[in-house]
Structures are given as structure tokens and as C-alpha cells.
Image (spheres, rainbow, N blue to C red):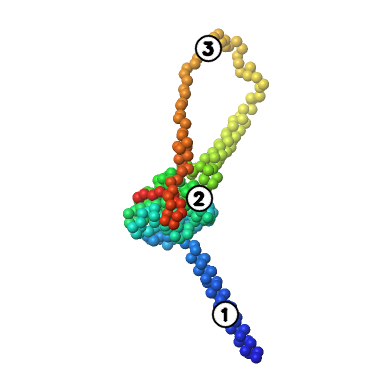
């Protein structure tokens, strides 16, 4: 009887372990299946080491900003337009953070040398049409020269910059990523320290000089007489600048949008390289 009971317990334990293993593997499969990589290099433009480096950059920016940054390369668009291909790939693979699927996808097609940047959710707000045009000035040369890692890294870093800028300043106009205030403080501080050193040395040499309450000591009595005084008006200069109209002032914050086949709203812009 004890032997039979022991056998039953062993079988029961085996099935418990088996079921737990199946559930664990199913959960693991679902986890990986739900997360498509942010770098898909179907055109094989990057080496293995370059893929590892770029994927790390894309993942780090995406997780920190909570906006998916994706790079997709393909040998052909398979008859679709760059807009359709980019939007459909983004939607079909469920990219994007939050309910609005926030993200930015950079598509490269080698067949006709097309590039296109598709924006979704907060990506539309952060990376406007004007921002994309600005970004292209920095990555197009590298694309045309075959420096793909450099071009994709530039794209990712500029996305990071514009997302941060839109979050903290509300201004999306293209600007050089130059830390003006910080650099001014640093250079001012260095100049101030140098001036203290120089003036300190000059001060130590002036041992014969004593502070005076007035400037009379420097004036020779009866040496100068002013007999006539006139104020002469030489010229005047007035600048007139036309005030920007509302549509001009807000141009940098506007993105043209469209609806993809899945019904989602996308922005974006592209061209040739």
C-alpha cells in the first residue's frame, strides 16, 4: 500500500513539474514574442558588433524617454511606398509606449535608396516636420557614404535631444545642441579667476599708492579752464522688424499627419539618399 501511494505521489509530482515548466515556457515565449527588437537590419548594412552597439543606444534612449526609437533597414519596399511600409511595420509589430504608442521609426530601403521617418503619439509632438528636415542635414551625407552606424547613431541622438527639449521647454524649433548657459558660466568663472590673479599681482606692486576720498590729488590747480560747452546730436538709427504672424511663429511646432491602414495617426517625412 505504501509503495502504491509513493508511486502515485511521484507521478503527481512529475505532472506538477511538467505543467509548471510548460506554463513558464509559454510565459517566456509570450514575453519575447511581444517585444520586437528596436533594430531590424534586413538589408544587412551593419556588422554584428555595430548592431550590438546601435541596439544598446536605441534601447537606452527608448527606455529612458519612454518613446520607442526604431531603426529598420530593408532591401526592398515590396511595392509599397516608404510611408506605408514604415507605418505598417510600426503598427503591425506593436511598437510604442503607452496608449498613444509613442515612438519614432527610421526606415532605410536600399532598392531605390529611400529613407523615411515615421512618428507616432508623442513622437509627432517631439519630432516635427521641421525637426526631421533639420536631422536629415546631419545624417544624409553619412547614408550616401555608407556610414550607416554613424547615420543611425546621429538619428537616435537627435531624437533624444528633441524629445528632451519638447518636454522641458515646450519649444520644438531646431537648435544647435549647444549648452550655452553652462559654457558661459564655465568661461566666465575661468576668466574671473585669471583676472583675480593678474590684478592681485598688480595690487602688490602698488605699495606707494594709498586710497583717496577724492580725485583732487591728481589735478593740477588752475591748469584747465572750460570756456564753452555744447551738446551735438550726430544721428539716430531706428530698426523696424515685421512681427511674425501666428502661423509663422508656430510653424516649428506643427507636424502634418495622416492615418495608416490600421487607423493610427502618424507623422513623418522622407526622401532619397
In the rendered view, tell whether residue 232 sits above or below residue 159: above
Task: Please count the marks in the image.
Answer: 3
Q: Of marks 2 and 1, which one's residue comes earlier in the chain?
A: 1
x, y percent for residue 128: 45, 46
- Determine the residue located farthest toward the bottom in the rendered image: 1
- Work out how far the residue at label 2 is from the one at label 1, CA to CA, in angstroms: 48 Å
The residue that mark 3 highlights is 230
Q: Nearer the viewer, residue 101 or 127?
A: 101
Residue sitting at x 42%, y 62%: 48
Q: Of marks 3 and 2, which one's residue comes earlier in the chain?
A: 2
- Work out how far the residue at label 1 is from the one at label 3, CA to CA, in angstroms: 110 Å
The residue that mark 1 highlights is 15
Residue sitting at x 48%, y 65%: 33
| Marker disc for residue 122 | 2
In what quadrant of the picture does the N terminus appear? bottom right
* 10 Å crowding of disc 3: few (<14), some (14-19), many (20+): few
The answer to whether residue 265 is visible is yes
Q: Are marks 3 and 2 in contact (CB under 8 Å)?
A: no
Q: Is residue 48 left or right of residue 112?
A: right
x, y percent for residue 217: 63, 18
Amino acid at each position: 500500500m505504501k509503495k502504491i501511494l509513493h508511486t502515485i505521489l511521484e507521478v503527481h509530482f512529475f505532472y506538477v513539474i511538467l505543467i509548471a515548466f510548460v506554463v513558464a515556457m509559454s510565459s517566456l515565449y509570450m514575453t519575447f514574442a511581444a517585444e520586437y527588437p528596436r533594430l531590424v537590419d534586413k538589408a544587412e548594412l551593419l556588422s554584428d558588433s555595430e548592431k550590438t552597439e546601435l541596439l544598446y543606444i536605441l534601447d537606452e534612449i527608448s527606455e529612458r524617454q519612454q518613446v520607442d526609437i526604431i531603426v529598420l533597414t530593408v532591401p526592398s519596399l515590396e511595392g509599397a511606398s516608404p510611408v506605408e511600409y514604415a507605418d505598417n511595420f510600426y503598427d503591425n509589430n506593436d511598437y510604442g509606449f503607452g496608449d498613444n504608442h509613442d515612438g519614432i521609426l527610421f526606415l532605410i530601403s536600399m532598392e531605390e535608396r529611400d529613407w523615411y521617418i515615421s512618428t507616432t503619439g508623442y513622437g509627432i509632438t517631439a519630432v516635427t516636420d521641421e525637426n526631421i528636415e533639420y536631422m536629415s542635414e546631419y545624417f544624409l551625407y553619412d547614408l550616401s557614404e555608407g556610414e550607416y552606424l554613424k547615420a543611425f547613431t546621429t538619428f537616435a541622438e537627435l531624437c533624444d535631444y528633441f524629445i528632451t527639449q519638447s518636454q522641458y521647454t515646450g519649444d520644438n524649433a531646431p537648435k544647435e545642441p549647444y549648452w550655452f548657459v553652462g559654457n558661459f558660466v564655465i568661461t566666465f568663472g575661468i576668466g574671473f579667476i585669471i583676472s583675480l590673479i593678474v590684478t592681485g599681482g598688480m595690487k602688490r606692486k602698488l605699495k606707494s599708492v594709498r586710497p583717496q576720498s577724492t580725485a583732487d590729488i591728481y589735478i593740477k590747480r588752475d591748469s584747465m579752464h572750460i570756456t564753452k560747452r555744447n551738446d551735438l546730436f550726430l544721428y539716430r538709427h531706428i530698426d523696424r522688424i515685421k512681427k511674425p504672424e501666428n502661423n509663422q511663429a508656430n510653424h516649428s511646432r506643427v507636424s502634418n499627419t495622416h492615418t495608416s491602414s490600421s487607423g493610427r495617426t502618424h507623422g513623418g517625412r522622407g526622401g532619397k539618399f
